[in-house]
Image: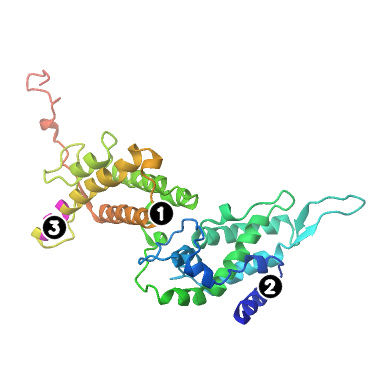
Amino acid sequence: MRREKTARDSLARATGTRTAEAAFVAPISREAVSGHHVPSRATSYAEPAGGGDWRSYARRVLNLRGVDVERVKMELETFVSETTPHNASGGGFITARSNPACGRPRALELSERVRPILDRLYPQWQNENLGSKTFEFQAERDACSRLLSRTASNEEIVALFSGHDDAPRLSASQMHELVWRAASAQWATDHRHEAVLAASKAVNSRLQEKLDRRDISEARLVREAFSDKPPEPGRPRLRYMHVEDEQTRDSMRQGVMAFGAGCFQAIRNPVGHLPNEDHELDAQPALERLAAFSLLLRWIDEASLEEAEPLLPSESPWAETPSGAMN
C-alpha cells in the first residue's frame, strides 16, 4: 500500500491533475488471482502461455523495448499539466464549459505530440477514455494520466508476472509495419478476426503492387510470383538472388510459395468467408495469424523482381513482314 500511495502521489505532483488517483493502475488482489476473472480488452501483446486468471491483467504490462521512457513521461506530463481545465465563465457569462490553461492552440499542438505516443503504447485509449461535452481535451488527459500510471508501475507488475512465465512475448507493434498498421484499428475495438482480414488484404495489395499485377490475387498470385517458370511479359517472378547457394535459393522460393499460399487459404479465407460468430478469435491465435502475414510480407520484401526481357521489334506479333503485311 505504501508503494501504491507513493507512486500515486508522485504522479499527482508530476502532472498536477486530480485524475492521477483514478488513473492509477490498481495492484492485483489475492481475490483476482485466485478466481475472479476481470475481462480485458485486446492488446498488441500476446497473453503469456500457461493459463490462469492472472492473464487478464497482462494488458497492464507495457512493451517498452526501444522506447525513450523518460522522454515519453515528459511529453505526457507536459500535456496533462498545461491542459488543466479552467472554467470559461466570466464577464457575467456562466457556462459549464472549460478551456485548457495553456489555450486551445497550444493544447492542440500538445495533443498532436501525445496522440502518437498513446497510439503506440496504449492502442485502446480512445475506447477506454470517454470524451467530455464540456472539455475538448478530456479523453487525451485521462489517457495520458493512465499511461503515466502504467509506466510508473510497469516494473512492479512485470515482477508480479515473472513467477508465472518468463517466455518471450509476441508484440504486434514489432511486426511488419504494414501488417500492424492495417490491423491496429480493428484490434483496438476487439474485432480480432477483422484485424487479421485487414492484414491479409494489406499483404495482398503489397504483392500486387510489387508485381504490378491486378488481374489475380492472394494464393494464385503467390504461386505465380514464386513459380519456377521463367518470367513472361506481364508475369514477373520473385527470386532470392542474394542467397548464394543454388539449392537453398530454390528451397526458399518453394517454401515461401507454399507458406504464402497457405496463409491466404488457411488464414485469410476462413475469416473472410465464415460468419463472425463462427470464427471469432482469441488474442493469442489472432496474434499468431498476424505474425504469419508479417513474416510472409518480410519475405516478399526481401525477394528481388525478375522480369522478362523486352521483345525485340522483330519478335513482336505485330511486326511487319518484308512485304509490308502484318504477321
- State which tag comes first along the sequence, 1 or 2: 2
The relative height of residue 82 versus residue 237 in the rendered view (above or below) is below
Residue at image position (63%, 81%) is 2
- Residue under circle 1? 180
- State which tag comes first along the sequence, 2 or 3: 2
- Residue under circle 3? 249
Tell me, yes or no, if residue 28 can be seen here.
no
Gap between marks 1 and 2 measured at Cα: 34 Å
Q: Judge the density around disc 3: few (<14), some (14-19), many (≥20) Cα neighbours within 10 Å.
A: some
Gap between marks 2 and 3 measured at Cα: 59 Å
In front: 227, or 284?
A: 284
Residue 73 at x, y = what percent?
58, 71
The relative height of residue 15 versus residue 2 in the rendered view (above or below) is above
What's the residue type where badge 1 is placed?
Trp
Quarter assignment of residue 251: bottom left
- Is 289 included in the stretch rendered in magenta? no
The relative height of residue 89 versus residue 82 in the rendered view (above or below) is above
Query: Start and end of the magenta stretch?
Result: 248-254
Residue most extreme to the right:
92
Drawn side of residue 114 relative to residue 244, left or right: right
- Element type at mark 2: helix
What's the residue type where badge 2 is placed?
Ala
- State which tag comes first along the sequence, 3 or 1: 1
Q: Which mark is residue 12?
A: 2
- Element type at mark 3: helix
Residue at image position (89%, 49%) is 93
Tell me, yes or no, if residue 22 can be seen here.
yes
Residue 308 at x, y = what percent?
16, 42
Magenta span: chief secondary structure: helix
